Amino acid sequence: MDEFETRLKEAQPLLWCNPSYQPDGDDEARAGLARAVADWAELAPLIAALWPETSGTIRSDLRSGAAAGLGDALWIKCDHDLPVAGSVKARGGLFEVLVTARTQARAAGLLSPDGDIATLAKPEARAFFAQRRIAVGSTGNLGLSVGIAARALGYQTTVHMSHDAKAWKVQRLRDLGVEVVQHDSDYSAAVAAARNIAANDPLTHFVDDEASELLFRGYSAAARELQRQLAKAGIEIGPDRPLVLYLPCGIGGAPGGIAYGARAVFGPDVHAFFMEPVQAPSALVQMRAGLARATDVYEVGLSNRTEADGMAVATMSGLVAHAMHTRLAGVITVDDDRLLCDLARMADHGFRLEPSAASGFAGPAMLETTEEGRAFLARHLTPEAAQNIVHLVWTTGGAFVPEDQYQDFIVRGRAISKHLQDRS
């Protein structure tokens, strides 16, 4: 067993660099992104009709890390505060539900190819959708986004959740009229059970987080939004000013889609790292093992247990693993203590995060101070470019966390920080 394998099995924070990584231009990604952007534009009138406060756009702020005492080389993409669903999953879950509704309505003659898609928010369409069901397997945030969107259109909705789903997420869904089925198993087993149940009902559309191209496409359009925001901030990404993304990862759909879109926009000048808990690094173990067979965190002796419930995933999406084979720079793991410390620290600056959303803040130091990170920079960047990196942390959820639970996270994070300071 080599040193890296030992550190992985001992659940130590580490950085793994993808040996198959090829920063390059990407015609396939550009074509995929163009389709995603066009779809979102077509959905905009329906989004505005269902959620007027959005004006038809699902987007989040880009904020400088300087406002949080993190320096002006770091930026924060605030998907923890996305409208409608309060997490990055709004970009995927809403997209898949609304595209599915469009497809079904067209097939039934309720919507012509050039018809006003906003009519799908009207009673006639709701009656049509009420005869159909949307189902999904989720640890929480995807279920919330799918449940909110599906119920807004009138669908019957079922969310299958793993044993580690937060109670408040279960209750919020039930309050929306969503049927919640809880399984005494982990995320992957809950998804498999949900998939099997949905397969037996021709009126059920199953949102498959492990293999959905629609989810992946919905997430990818975030890169175009980011490009516009960076340009507005006077930041031009290029060979001398590269962009490094730190993307929280569970099953991989959201970070994979965002990384894919970013490759389309920024080409070889963007480098995406997935952030994962030390006990649930599903992307790390799968990408490291290669694409020949599926593997999971249990095979290396890890527990898949973490405070970051949205990242408690034992097996990476095969679709995402293949899409990221040459597009992912690497994976960085972080322990729960660090998640809670960073959550509490960011709370002092007005960022309301859940633990998984705080994972990216460990990224820049791992890249710049570890042996693996320094080797990556030397291999892919000039010394001048390495000094001019735009680090971007993608915060992915937290807006909907109940106040009592959020305050508990903060108290625990501050206690851990104090303990670590006292030891040093």
Image (tube, rainbow, N blue to C red):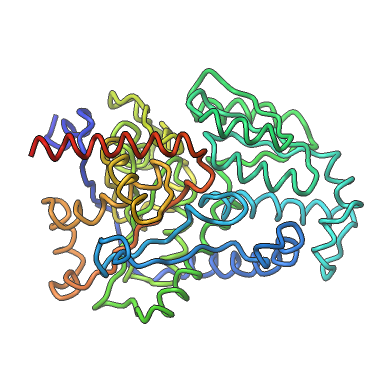
Q: How many marks?
A: 0
Quadrant of the rendering where the N terminus is positioned: top left
Picture coordinates of residue 325 (x, y %)? Answer: 37, 52
User: Which quarter of the picture shows residue 195?
Assistant: top right
View extreme (left): residue:
424
Picture coordinates of residue 297 (x, y %)? Answer: 34, 30
Image position of 106 with respect to 338: above or below: below
User: Which quarter of the picture shows residue 239?
Assistant: bottom left
Image position of 322 with respect to 228: above or below: above
User: Which quarter of the picture shows residue 150?
Assistant: top right
Residue, x 33% and y 76% (percent of image)?
Answer: 237
Name the one closer to the observer, 217 or 254.
Answer: 254
User: Relative to residue 366, is residue 226 drawn left or right?
Assistant: right
Image position of 335 with respect to 269: above or below: above
Residue, x 59% and y 64% (percent of image)?
Answer: 36
Residue, x 60% and y 67% (percent of image)?
Answer: 35
User: Relative to residue 154, is residue 337 drawn left or right?
Assistant: left
Name the one closer to the observer, 31 or 207.
Answer: 207
Picture coordinates of residue 73 (x, y %)? Answer: 26, 68
Residue, x 32% and y 39% (percent of image)?
Answer: 340
User: Relative to residue 412, is residue 55 drawn left or right?
Assistant: right
Quadrant of the rendering where the C terminus is positioned: top left
Picture coordinates of residue 124 (x, y %)? Answer: 92, 52
